[in-house]
Image (tube, helix red, strand yellow):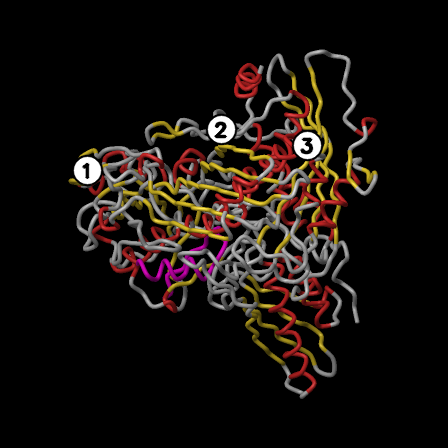
């Protein structure tokens, strides 16, 4: 047996990307291609009364101007089809004549050149009737609030309840009660390449869209639905993808590219159509991380045992649902942390506003929930005079523990071991069976009086795979070629390579399962014409799901080979244990089939005169079950920490009255080499998941989750002031320090 799993293998795409040879959607050129531009609304809320396209259509070089009337089925949405493909009059579905955020698409222009398309776009005259703008989610919940979607009857489109024990009664019995009100910001994905794609009719007459995404078959389904075509008439191909982080899970250019190709072909024009968004278009045109408002009360005994949590969660969903209900589901579970609490009340809400829609982003509700939960834990530790690691150790979930939803975790719970490993690496020691941080292990204070140092700690858990009853499966196909022995294996898999190293991992797992050298395994990936549905590259699921599917396909292919089928071909669908949705009254559910566990300790330095925070060191302990490729795991940890650092201290996405203020990377600041931690220590732990392939768990999201509350804890250790909202910009830090005096 060739041992490939667990080894550091060079990424299969490393050379092409380093040399600049890898083709991203915006790099692809085809003979005869024409260019597309989109007319965005630039209105937060309005009815489109009339669209005059006559001047644009008369321009030399303009091939087509498409509006709502040209869309066969003018709706789409990953969870609920509540968004028009193009907003305006002429569609049969009610209320598709209105725009609800500044990035709503109103018209599509196809022309010989990008410049002509832009000129034609600017020549289109749109008559709007402005509507009231609703941007405060709490105000949007009021009975007299203006409805963004009149057909839905309420701006509240999601509400979950958890009722475990009697939280109110337990709070009255608690020795100490800590209250907190926490606000988390929107965040932009800032992937490497803005949205781009190419559409054409392939040789079999399929509407073909080459684009960067996270779920080829979901893209295919949404394009086919909007164009009213059978699935087999639509093909989606992913080339190199310059990052995703959840930002490519929903539609951007996919449907309009397909629409343009279809309408041009009906006119006898068979030419490829290309579009590349500017960074500014990307900033207002695609969804963001949800801002959350969380109000919470936790009660504990004198010994530090948490006995009650009472939480209200409000998520700003923005103009359309996207994945908000699923993100809210995760946040509802995560807002009480990885702790066994006997009495829990949670009410959580997702609300429509005229902000940019909010959707999937690395962590998927976990960072927002973790910020509230871990801040509460750190404040409880302070109120009780306890060490922050010790109070966690006394409350952490264990094998057989009941979640807030009243059911036990799946087997393989390792959060205790993860917390202890991280704490020990950061200097915590056991004294009289209790964890403490000795004085000589605390950050060394420098001589400058205006610079203070502190250490903070936080932990978290996160689902692997889709949650709360969402259908979950993954397909893989393997072909074995040769005569007396297998000379080549071909793996067909739709899973997207978004920069995380997935395709390298797929090949490693296939080689391991087949007992072949890596050099004899070839991957055909991310093309709906030749691969079955893999599900989304999200929810830290792809290694877990693909690995199980690949191993199943390998076993069946090898059996066929043994039976002398040459070539041997096997297709396998992996289905994990079923999950169940929240009970509408109690919240009881089987939410997930697997979890990942993480803990982080952070050292910071803050200049109390300028408010500037410097991240000195981050220790991240992450149980990955089995590191299929340890170097890729380390890269995921370091990447997540850097991205979370931006979320914590820099990235201030500002919308005012529905307008985006921070439209460029000169106003929306992301971490540079001067902002990232001086050091990231990756503690890779391997406690096998009982149902994971080779024991692997998912881990791509986990290192993101606890960093912000660990930083705010470190800031409190340095200054004595708690910060319940972020990003921790210098201005916000100075204001907080002043108020905290």
Q: How far is the residue under mark 1 from the one under mark 3?
A: 61 Å
Q: How far is the residue under mark 1 from the one under mark 2?
A: 40 Å
Q: How far is the residue under mark 2 from the one under mark 3?
A: 23 Å
Which of the marked residues, 1 or 2, is nearer the chain's N terminus?
1
Q: Is residue 586 above or below residue 522?
A: above
Circles 1 and 3, Cβ within 8 Å, touching? The answer is no
Q: Nearer the viewer, mark 1 or mark 2?
A: 2
x and y, in percent, of residue 639 in the image: 64, 41
Q: Quadrant of residue 572?
A: bottom right
Callout 1 secondary element: helix
Which mark is on residue 652?
Answer: 2
Give the magenta range.
205-226
Q: Which residue is mark 1?
A: 55
> Neighbour class for label 1 at 10 Å: few (<14), some, many (≥20)?
few
> Neighbour class for label 2 at 10 Å: few (<14), some, many (≥20)?
many
Q: Is residue 514 above or below residue 12?
A: below
Which of the marked residues, 1 or 3, is nearer the chain's N terminus?
1
x and y, in percent, of residue 366 in the image: 54, 45
Q: Is residue 620 left or right of residue 187?
A: right
Residue 389 colored in magenta in the image: no
- Residue at 39 percent of width and 48 percent of height: 253
Extreme-bottom residue of the structure: 563
Residue 209 colored in magenta in the image: yes
- Residue at 77 percent of width and 45 percent of height: 421
Which mark is on residue 456?
Answer: 3
x and y, in percent, of residue 228 in the image: 29, 63
Q: Quadrant of residue 270?
A: bottom left
């Amino acid at each position: 047996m060739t041992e490939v799993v667990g080894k550091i293998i060079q990424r299969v795409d490393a050379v092409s990307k380093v040399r600049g040879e890898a083709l991203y959607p915006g790099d692809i050129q085809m003979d005869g291609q024409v260019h597309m531009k989109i007319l965005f609304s630039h209105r937060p809320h309005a009815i489109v009364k009339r669209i005059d396209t006559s001047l644009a259509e008369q321009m030399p070089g303009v091939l087509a101007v498409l509006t709502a009337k040209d869309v066969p089925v003018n709706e789409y949405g990953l969870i609920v089809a509540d968004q028009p493909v193009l907003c305006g009059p002429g569609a049969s579905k009610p209320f598709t004549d209105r725009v609800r955020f500044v990035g709503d698409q109103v018209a599509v222009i196809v022309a010989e050149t990008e410049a002509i398309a832009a000129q034609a776009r600017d020549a289109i005259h749109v008559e709007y009737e402005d509507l009231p703008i609703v941007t405060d989610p709490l105000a949007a919940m009021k009975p007299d609030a203006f409805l963004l979607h009149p057909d839905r009857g309420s701006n509240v489109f999601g509400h979950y309840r958890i009722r475990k024990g009697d939280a109110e009664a337990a709070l009255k019995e608690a020795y100490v009660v800590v209250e907190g009100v926490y606000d988390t910001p929107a965040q932009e994905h800032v992937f490497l390449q803005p949205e781009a794609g190419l559409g054409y009719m392939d040789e079999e007459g399929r509407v073909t869209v080459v684009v960067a995404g996270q779920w080829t078959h979901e893209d295919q389904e949404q394009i086919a639905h909007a164009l009213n075509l059978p699935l087999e008439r639509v093909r989606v191909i992913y080339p190199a993808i310059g990052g995703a982080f959840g930002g490519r899970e929903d539609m951007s250019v996919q449907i309009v590219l397909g629409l343009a190709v279809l309408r041009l072909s009906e006119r006898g024009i068979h030419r490829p159509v290309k579009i590349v968004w500017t960074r500014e278009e990307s900033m207002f045109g695609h969804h963001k991380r949800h801002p959350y408002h969380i109000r919470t009360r936790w009660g504990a005994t004198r010994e530090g045992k948490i006995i009650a949590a009472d939480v209200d969660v409000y998520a700003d969903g923005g103009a359309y649902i996207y994945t908000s209900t699923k993100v809210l589901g995760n946040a509802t579970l995560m807002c009480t942390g990885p702790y066994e609490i006997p009495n829990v009340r949670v009410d959580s809400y997702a609300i429509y506003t005229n902000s940019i829609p909010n959707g999937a982003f690395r962590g998927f509700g976990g960072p927002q929930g973790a910020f509230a939960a871990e801040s509460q834990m750190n404040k409880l530790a302070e109120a009780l005079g306890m060490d922050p690691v010790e109070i966690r150790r006394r409350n952490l979930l264990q094998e057989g523990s009941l979640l807030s939803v009243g059911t036990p975790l799946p087997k393989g719970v390792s959060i205790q071991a993860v917390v202890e490993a991280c704490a020990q690496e950061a200097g915590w020691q056991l004294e009289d069976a209790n964890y403490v941080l000795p004085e000589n292990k605390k950050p060394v204070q420098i001589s400058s009086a205006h610079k203070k140092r502190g250490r903070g700690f936080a932990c978290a858990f996160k689902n692997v795979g889709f949650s709360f009853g969402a259908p979950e499966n993954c397909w893989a196909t393997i072909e074995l070629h040769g005569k007396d022995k297998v000379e080549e294996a071909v793996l067909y898999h739709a899973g997207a390579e978004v920069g995380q190293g997935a395709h390298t991992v797929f090949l490693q797992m296939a080689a391991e399962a087949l007992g072949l050298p890596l050099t004899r395994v070839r991957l055909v990936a991310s093309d709906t014409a030749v691969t079955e549905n893999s599900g989304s590259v999200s929810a830290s699921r792809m290694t877990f799901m693909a690995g199980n599917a690949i191993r199943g396909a390998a076993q069946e292919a090898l059996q066929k080979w043994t039976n002398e089928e040459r070539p041997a071909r096997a297709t396998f669908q992996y289905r994990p244990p079923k999950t169940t949705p929240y009970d509408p009254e109690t919240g009881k559910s089987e939410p997930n089939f697997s979890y990942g566990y993480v803990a982080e300790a952070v050292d910071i330095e803050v200049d109390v005169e300028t408010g500037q925070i410097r991240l000195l060191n981050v220790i991240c302990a992450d149980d990955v079950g089995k590191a299929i490729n340890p170097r890729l795991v380390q890269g995921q940890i370091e990447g997540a920490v850097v991205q979370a650092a931006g979320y914590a201290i820099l990235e201030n996405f500002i919308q005012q009255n529905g307008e985006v203020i921070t439209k460029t990377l000169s106003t929306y600041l992301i971490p540079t080499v001067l902002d990232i931690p001086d050091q990231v220590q990756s503690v890779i732990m391997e406690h096998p998941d009982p149902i994971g392939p080779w024991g692997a768990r998912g881990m791509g999201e986990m290192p993101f989750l606890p960093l912000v509350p660990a930083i705010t804890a470190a800031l409190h250790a340095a200054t004595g002031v708690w910060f319940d909202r972020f990003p921790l910009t210098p201005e916000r830090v100075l204001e907080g320090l002043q108020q905290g005096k």
